[in-house]
Amino acid sequence: MIKPQEIGKAGCAPAKNSFEDPMEHLLACHRRIEQRLESLELVAANYEAKPDEAREALRATFKYFDTNGAWHTEDEEVSIFPRILPRLDAEEREFIAKLELQHEGAHASYEKLKAHAGELNADFCEVVAAFCACYREHIATEESMLIAIGRNYLTAKELTTISTEMKARRGLE
């Protein structure tokens, strides 16, 4: 049931040319993150029956979040938020502040997940459920406004610069 080799294949490879449209790239990253959340839930549901596969799936998932997940957050906090904040009204700035708080919460939840991964048990399953719920809420929140805000406020030149920064973060330029 758990197929870590499939997780590894998806890796962080973006959809073709997704870096050329940074807002589209964020959406594509969300889909890949959701795949990792599903993998975590499979681990939690099957760790007793397939402990070796569960551990391998966890390693692959942690590798993803430690690299691509971190880069995704940097894409937003370093490349996008600072460029759009000066143009936003009070409600939109409050929305960005909420996203930043959610990033902090997701990071804390992820650290707790990693700390509990050594012992695959009921406590671990609860931590997985909390982490997945936290991240899914964050994705839904981002997609409710951030993509539209980015498309409305970022210039073509800024989007090109953001694209370059995203690629550089991943060692692609």
Image (cartoon, rainbow, N blue to C red):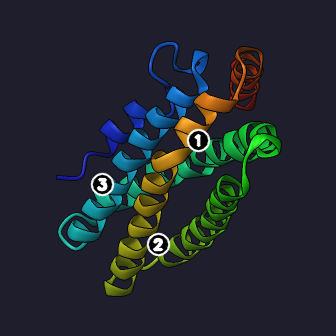
User: Reading the chain from its start, which is encountered first: label 2 or label 1?
Assistant: 1
Categorize mark 3 by other alpha carbons within 10 Å: few (<14), some (14-19), many (20+): few
Q: Give how far across and how far down residue 172 sits, in percent.
A: 69, 19
Frontmost of labels 2 and 1 is 1
Residue at left 74%, top 32%?
Answer: 169
Q: Quadrant of residue 23?
A: top right
Marker disc for residue 84: none
Mark 2 and mark 1: Cα distance apart in space? 19 Å
Q: Which residue corresponds to mark 1?
A: 68
Mark 1 and mark 3: Cα distance apart in space? 16 Å
**Left or right: 137 as drawn, with respect to 73:** left
Marker disc for residue 117: 2
Q: Amino acid at mark 1?
A: Asn
Q: Does 67 sit above or below residue 16?
A: below
Categorize mark 2 by other alpha carbons within 10 Å: few (<14), some (14-19), many (20+): some
Mark 3–mark 2 CB contact (< 8 Å):
no
User: Reading the chain from its start, which is encountered first: label 3 or label 2?
Assistant: 3
Q: Quadrant of residue 79?
A: top right
> Which quadrant does the C terminus fall into?
top right
Q: Give how far across and how far down residue 159 sits, in percent.
A: 70, 21
Whether residue 92 is visible here, answered yes or no, is yes
Q: Does 109 sit above or below residue 6?
A: below
User: Reading the chain from its start, which is encountered first: label 1 or label 3?
Assistant: 3
Categorize mark 1 by other alpha carbons within 10 Å: few (<14), some (14-19), many (20+): many
Count of picture labels: 3
Q: Does 41 sit above or below residue 139?
A: below
Q: Amino acid at mark 2?
A: Ala
Q: Quadrant of residue 76?
A: top right
